[in-house]
Structures are given as structure tokens and as C-alpha cells.
Amino acid sequence: MERRINAAGMALLKHWEQLRLEAYPDPCSPDGNPWTIGWGHTVGVYPGLTITEYEAELLLAQDLDEAERVVNEAVKVDLSDNEFSALVVFVHNVGAGSKDRPGHRGRDGFVTLRSGKPSSLLASINAGEPNPDHFLRWNKAGVPPMPVKGLTARRFAERQLFLKKESAPARTT
């Protein structure tokens, strides 16, 4: 059975992403890319794009399906609902990642770093020794990468959810 984000995870995601119905540039990127809309949606977004709240919810459902798939496939050990949901929120923000290859610069993410290795967060989880402090390493943006206050707070909140023992029921399809 495919796991789904729980209510605590959804609340955390919506707190940090905040609903925006007009496209806006990434505040942490020197060139503004990727443009973002809705609840942190970036695919196919361009300056001047507007959507409705209903469309934002549809885009969020699609994005969550992808983030949940990534976590379901990458994590090889049992997780609590809160651990799973914290990882989904994290993946929704940072992505799965991709390896550098000729003519394409990869991107560090939860599953794959540009080097081709797994992230330390994923590696620690799959080794059966999860280290939630690894969330805190993902707080940098810009060129050169520098700590960002908002990302630091967000990673701390994701870490806290990961560590929280009680859980709300999982989201249903």
C-alpha cells in the first residue's frame, strides 16, 4: 500500500508554502528561477501566470502524489506516519535530485546528489539509523550557497515532525 501524507504533514507544508495565486520568483535564487505558484508548485510556471484556489489544490495534489511516490520508492525501512510525512514535505521543497551528466548540471535532492550518491538523510534512514539532524543541512540557497533564515526554520520544523511520536490519520486518495 502506498503511504500518504498525514494531516500534520499537510499543515506543515501549507504553513511553509503559503497559498499564492500569482506566480512569483524564487526569493532564494539569483535569477528568480524556478517561478512558483499555488502551494509551492514550480512546473510550467512563468511570470504573469495566475490560478484559482481550486487549481492550486489540484496542483498540490499532483505535487504530493510525486513527493509521496519518491519517498515510498526511496525509503526501504518502516516509517511512522510523521516520519513519512516530514519526508514528503521535505521532498516537495527540495525534490528528488539528479546526478551531473555531460551537458546537464544535476541537482542535489533527497534521493540523489549531483555526485550520484544518496543524500545523507536518506542513507541514514535506509541504514536503520535515521539522523534527523540531517534535515538541518538543507538550509542554504543562492550563489554561493549561504544559510537562509526561513529555510533553517523550515528544516527545524520538518525535523520536529519527523521526531514527533503521535500521528494523525493518513490522507486518503
Image: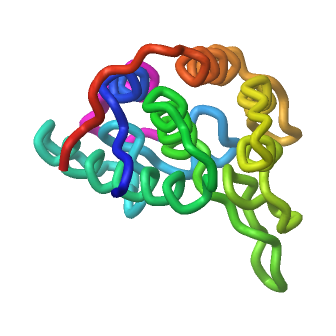
Figure check: 68 above or below 170: below
Q: Residue at x 43, y 14 (%)?
A: 166
The answer to which quarter of the image holds residue 39 is: top left
Q: Is residue 30 left or right of residue 77?
A: right
Q: Is residue 135 left or right of residue 170?
A: right
- Indicate the position of residue 67 as horizontal and vertical percent values: 46, 52
Q: Is residue 154 left or right of residue 148?
A: left
Can see residue 140?
A: no
The span picked out in magenta is 15-24
- Indicate the position of residue 131 as horizontal and vertical percent values: 78, 29
Q: Residue at x 64, y 21 (%)?
A: 159
The answer to which quarter of the image holds residue 103 is: bottom right
Q: Would you say residue 17 sits in the magenta stretch?
A: yes
As rendered, which of 85 and 36 lies closer to the eye?
Answer: 85
Q: Would you say residue 9 sits in the magenta stretch?
A: no
Residue at far bottom of view = 102
As rendered, which of 120 and 48 lies closer to the eye?
Answer: 120
Figure check: 99 above or below 56: below
Q: Residue at x 36, y 38 (%)?
A: 5
Can see residue 157?
A: yes
- Indicate the position of residue 173 as horizontal and vertical percent values: 18, 50
Q: Residue at x 68, y 57 (%)?
A: 111
As rendered, which of 21 and 116 lies closer to the eye?
Answer: 116
- Indicate the position of residue 54 as horizontal and vertical percent values: 11, 42
Q: Is residue 72 left or right of residue 38?
A: right
How many discs appear? Answer: 0
Figure check: 125 above or below 33: above
